Amino acid sequence: MTLKLVYPTLALILWIFIVGVILILRRKDAFTSGAVRHEDVQVSAERYPVSARLASANFSNQFETPVIYFALIMLAMEVGATSYAMAVLAWLYVATRVIHTLIHIGPNKLPVRGAVYGIGALALVGMWIGVLLAVV
């Protein structure tokens, strides 16, 4: 049943919306606190406070490897690679995206963030192998 792949995908989409809201709130706070003015950020986001720049960078990250995830999910559903192993890998990937965000917009410890990113990338490789095995 493909629903076991739909649920983590819906969760990831929800998470991307949440990160977008975090970005909006941090940028709004930058304006209301007086840290930036509209003229300061019309051309570049460099003048936003670090917290808003981190949220912006993380929001951009949600459109990097997740693109591969979404493609793999669609391929997996098309070729019938919808095993429980694939679902576990999908949930693992989604969990790493959430943890990555919490680290990125929180303490931003690069070694930990990099390790979490790497685990997510490995989950994607596992999903790719699952799709590949279903078509060979």
Image (cartoon, helix red, strand yellow):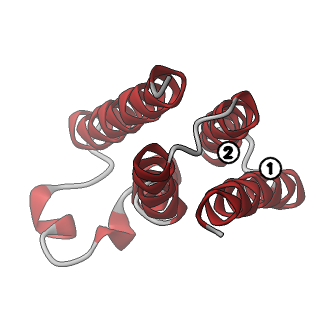
**Image side of residue 111 versus residue 101, left or right:** right
Callout 2, which amino acid? His
Measured from the top left, where is residue 116 in percent x and y?
A: 80, 50
Instruction: Give the crowd class for mark 2: few <14, some 14-19, many >=20 residues within 10 Å.
Output: many
Residue under label 1, please give it: 116
Please report whichever mark, 1 or 2, sits nearer to the chain's N-terminal start: 2
Could you tell me which residue is drawn at 32 percent across and 39 percent down? 20
Asked where in the image residue 111 lies, by quadrant, the reply is bottom right
**Image side of residue 130 versus residue 49, left or right:** right
Tag 1, which secondary structure?
helix
Tag 2, which secondary structure?
helix
The answer to whether residue 57 is visible is: no
The alpha-carbon separation of the residues under discs 1 and 2 comes to 6 Å
Measured from the top left, where is residue 14 in percent x and y?
A: 37, 27
Residue under label 2, please give it: 100
Instruction: Give yes or no for contact between labels 1 and 2 (Cβ–Cβ under 8 Å).
Output: yes
Instruction: Give the crowd class for mark 1: few <14, some 14-19, many >=20 residues within 10 Å.
Output: many
Residue in the foreground of this view, choosing between 65 and 135: 135
Callout 1, which amino acid? Val
Residue in the foreground of this view, choosing between 7 and 81: 81
Quadrant of the image containing the C terminus: bottom right
The answer to whether residue 9 is visible is: yes
**Image side of residue 130 versus residue 26, left or right:** right
Measured from the top left, where is residue 31 in percent x and y?
A: 22, 42
Q: Is residue 123 above or below residue 118?
A: above
Could you tell me which residue is drawn at 65 percent across and 62 percent down? 128
Measured from the top left, where is residue 132 in percent x and y?
A: 65, 66
Could you tell me which residue is drawn at 76 percent across and 56 percent down? 126
